Amino acid sequence: MFFKKQQLVSILCGFLVCAVPWSCEGKGPKAGSDEHQRDKKWDRHGAELEYRLIQAELRLARSEGLYLVLDMAREEFQLKLKGALVWNYPINAVNTDSQELQEFGERFLGDKGRVVRCLSGKHLFTAQDKTPDSVLAVVGEVVKVDPELLQRDVPARFQLLWGSGLTLEVRTDIVGKPKSPLKSTLMEFRHALRRPFGEAYLSVKMHPDDAITFYQAARVDLPTILRPSVLTTD
Amino acid sequence: MKVWLRYIAGLSVMLFGFFGAWLLITGGEASLNHIALSDDSLSVRLPEDDKQAKRELEKARQTLTKIKPSAPYIVIDTHANILTFRTENSIFLKATCSTGSGGELTDSNTGRRWIFTTPRGAFRVTTKLVEPWWRKPDWAFIEENESIPRDPNKRLDPEMLGEYALGFGDDYFIHGTLYERLLGVNVTHGCVRLGSDDLEKLYKAVEIGTLIYIF
C-alpha cells in the first residue's frame, strides 16, 4: 500500500469536503442564492399592506353592498359589487402639476397604513336638472308617477369627505344652480378652518353622466378602499 | 354676585364657541361604524414566518381572483339608467335603459301596497324569452282604476314587453318597450327597459346563468 490507513482516511475526508459543495453547485447553492435573493426582495411592509388590502376587499366583496376603490396604481375610481367592477372612471386631477393625488393617498393610508375608510359626508354645491320639469310633468302623468321622483340632479360640483381632512371635489363642465347655499357656505367656512390643521384636497374633473352615478352611489358610510400606487412585494 | 354671573356667562359663550368651531372642523367625521371597519383592517396580519406569510398572501390573491366574475356580465346602473355588458377590462355593449321609479301604489280597497323599485344586488339570467307576453299583475289594473279580471287570459298583453325578455330575480325582466322616448328616465315598475336594437344585441350575447349586477 502506498498510503497508510490514517493517510487514506484524511485524503478521503478532504475529498469529501471539497466534492460535496462542488457536486451541489448546480442545485443547492444556486437555489440557496435565489432564495437569498428572494428574501432580499421580500418586503414585509408591502406584503402586509397588500394582505390587508386583499382581506378588506374580500370582506366587502362578501357583503351585499357596493364599495368604492380608489385605485392609485391605475389612477381610477372603481365601484364594485360582490367583487365585480360595476363602474370605473379615470382620476382626472384638475391640477395636473400638483402632488394632490399623492398627498391624498398618503393621508388616506396615514402612519398605520389604513386601507379602508368609510365616506363620512357628501355635499352637492351646484347641479342642473337632468330633464326639464315641464317634460317630467307630462311623463309623470302618463306613467302615473310623481314627477319629482323622476327628476335627477346632474352634479356640476360636489364634495365627498372621509374625515381626517380627506376631501374629494368633483367638477363637471356643466353650469349648475346652487343647492342649499347656506350649507355650501358652512362647508367652505369649515375648509377654511381646517386648512391650518392640514387636509388633503383632491379636485377632479368628470363627465356629467358619470358624475350622476358617482354622486348617487356615494352614500354616506360607503366603504372605501385605497389601493396605493406601489405595492412592493415579490 | 353679578360680576361672577357675567364671568360664567362669558365663559359659557367661549366654551360654546370653541365647541361650535370644533364641530365645524371635525363635524360629520368617523362614526363608531367607520372606526370599527377601519380598525379591523389594521388588525389583519400575515404570519410571522416568511414562508408561511408568502403562502398566505398567495392564497389570499387567488381567493380574490376567484371571487371576481370569470365571464362577461351585465351591469345595471339605476342612477344613470345605463346598462352595460362587460368584463373588468372591456365593455361590449353600453345602452340607455329605464329602471324603477321608486313610486308607490296602494289599493284603496284591500290596502295592498307596492313600491316600484328595481332590486339591487347580484342576480343571474334565469330565462330567455322570444316574443314574450306580459301577464299583467294586479297593480297594473289598480293603477289604471280598472277592475281586476277573473279570466287569466284578460291579463295577457302580447306587445308591451317587446321582442325579447331576460328574466332575473323574483319575476323581474330586462325587456323592450313601446315608449323608447322615455329611456333614460326612471319610469318602470321595477323591470329594466331597453331599446329594441340594444335588447336584441343583449339577448344574443348572454346565456342563462349570466351574472347581473344592479346598483
Image: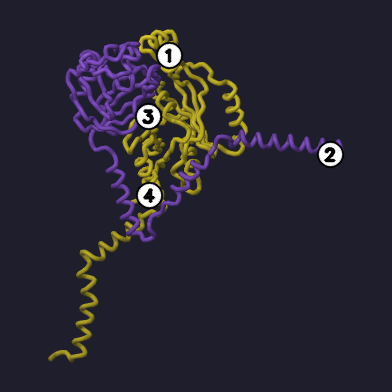
The reply to whether label 2 and label 4 mark residues of one chain is: no
Q: Earlier in the sequence, mark 4 or mark 3?
A: 4
The residue under label 2 is which amino acid type?
Trp
| The quarter of the displayed image where residue B97 is located | top left
The residue under label 4 is which amino acid type?
Tyr
Judged left or right of residue B74, residue B129 is left
Q: Position of residue B139 (x, y in %)?
A: 33, 18
In this rendering, which labeled residue sits more in front, label 3 or label 2?
A: 2
Q: Earlier in the sequence, mark 1 or mark 4?
A: 4
Residue corresponding to mark 1: A147
Q: Colour of chain B?
A: purple
Numbered marks: total: 4
Q: Colour of chain A?
A: yellow
Secondary structure beneath dot 2 equals: helix
Mark 4 belongs to which subunit? A
Question: Which sits in the foreground, A49 or A56?
Answer: A56
The residue under label 1 is which amino acid type?
Pro
For residue A51, the mark is 4
Residue corresponding to mark 3: A89
Judged left or right of residue A54, residue A127 is right
Secondary structure beneath dot 4 equals: helix
